[in-house]
Amino acid sequence: MLYHSFFTQEEIDQEYNPRFIVENSDELIQSYLTESERVSGEYPNIPRISYGSSAEETLDIFSSEIPASPIHIFFHGGYWHSMSSRDFAFVAEGLLRNGITAVLINYALCPKVTISEIVRQARAAVAWTYRNAMTFGGNPEQITVSGHSAGGHLTGMLLSTKWEKEYGLASDIIKGMLPISGLFDLGAFPFSWLQPKLQLSPELVSANSPLLLKPTSKTPVLLAVGADESLEFHRQSQEYCTFLEKQGVPAKYISVQRKNHFNIIHDFLGDGGNFCRQISEWSC
C-alpha cells in the first residue's frame, strides 16, 4: 500500500487530479483568466507589490473605497507548481462589492523552491499585510484568509504559525480562515504524478501537513469542498475539521452543492455568494 487505501499511482492520480473528474476543466480555468482580466480592468488595483526578497514574492491589492476596510487575503491554487495571483484576480470582485479589501498573494513555485519555502512566503505575506494595512486603507485588526486547492493547504499551514515567536505578532491576527478544496495531508503526493515537480521527502511531508500540526490559535475555520469533487478531497477536509475540533478550534465542514473543484470559487464573482458573506461575518 502506497498511501491510505491506495496501492498504485494510477489510483492516487485518479482521486487527486481534478482534471480526471471535471470534463470541462480547461474551459473553467480559462474562465479564471478571462474574468481576472475583466476584474483587473474594472477595479483599481496595485499589482506586484514586493513583500519579500525574491521576484516571485509579490501581492496585488484591490482596495475597498471604505476607509479602514476589512482585509481578505487569498492564496491561489495550482498544486504548488503553476499559476499566479494575477490568474485569480476575479476573486476580488465579490469582496470589493462587500466593502472588503482584497490582497492576492503570489509565491514562488516548485520545483524552483520547496513547499516549506512556499509556506514561509505565505506567512511572510500575511505579516507584511498586517504591518502595512493602513498604507492601503485596510484595517489590520480585521484580516481573514482563504485559499483554493494548494492555496487551501497554505491557509491551513497559517493556523500552525508561531506568530509571536517568529514575527512578533499576536497569535490571533487572522480572524477567520476559509480553505476551499484544501489539502491537509500531503502523504499521497510523493506517490503521484506531481512528485517530479514537488520533490517531496518524508520530512517535507510531515513538516507541511496541517493535519499533523498543532494549531497556535482558535481562529474559526470553514472548510468548503464542492459536492462533485473526489472522495479524497472530501476526506481531507472532513478529517482536518475533526482534528481542529479536537484541538478546540471552531471548525465546520461544508459540501457545496453543484460545485466541482474548479467552479467552486466562482462564488467570489459578481456580488459574491456564501463565501463572501462568511468573510463579512468574520470581519464584523
Image: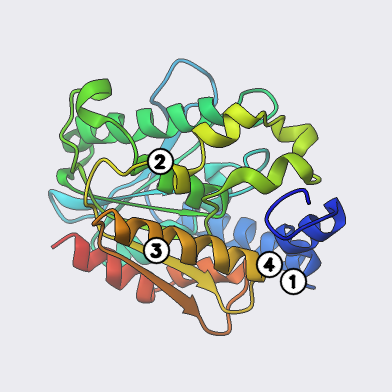
**Cβ atoms at labels 4 and 2 below 8 Å apart:** no
Which residue is at 67% across, 28% downward? 201
Q: Which mark is residue 28?
A: 4
Distance, label 4 to label 2, CA atoms, is 33 Å
Q: Nearer the viewer, mark 1 or mark 3?
A: 3
Amino acid type of disc 1? Val
Report which residue position mark 3 lands on: 242
Front one among 40 and 246: 246
Q: Residue at x 31, y 61 (%)?
A: 245
- Residue type at numbered disc 4: Leu
The answer to which of marks 2 and 1 sits earlier in the sequence is: 1
Total count of labels: 4
* N-term-proximal mark, 4 vs 1: 1
SS at badge 4? helix
Q: Which mark is residue 213?
A: 2
- Would residue 16 be found to the left or right of residue 274 on screen? right
Question: Which image quarter: residue 111?
Answer: top right
- Residue 80 location (% of width, % of height): 62, 40
Secondary structure type for disc 1: loop
Q: Residue furthest top?
A: 53
Does residue 271 show up?
A: no
- Nearest the viewer among 257 and 265 is 257
The Cα–Cα distance between marks 3 and 2, rounded to whole angstroms, is 13 Å
- Closer mark to the observer between disc 4 and disc 2: 2
Comes first in the chain, label 1 or label 3: 1
Name which quarter of the figure residue 216 lies in.
Answer: top left
* Image quarter hosting the C terminus: bottom left
93 and 141: which is toward the camera: 141
Report the amino acid beneath label 2.
Leu
Residue 223 shows which numbered tag?
A: none
Residue identified by numbered label 1: 22
Q: Position of residue 49 (x, y in %)?
A: 40, 29
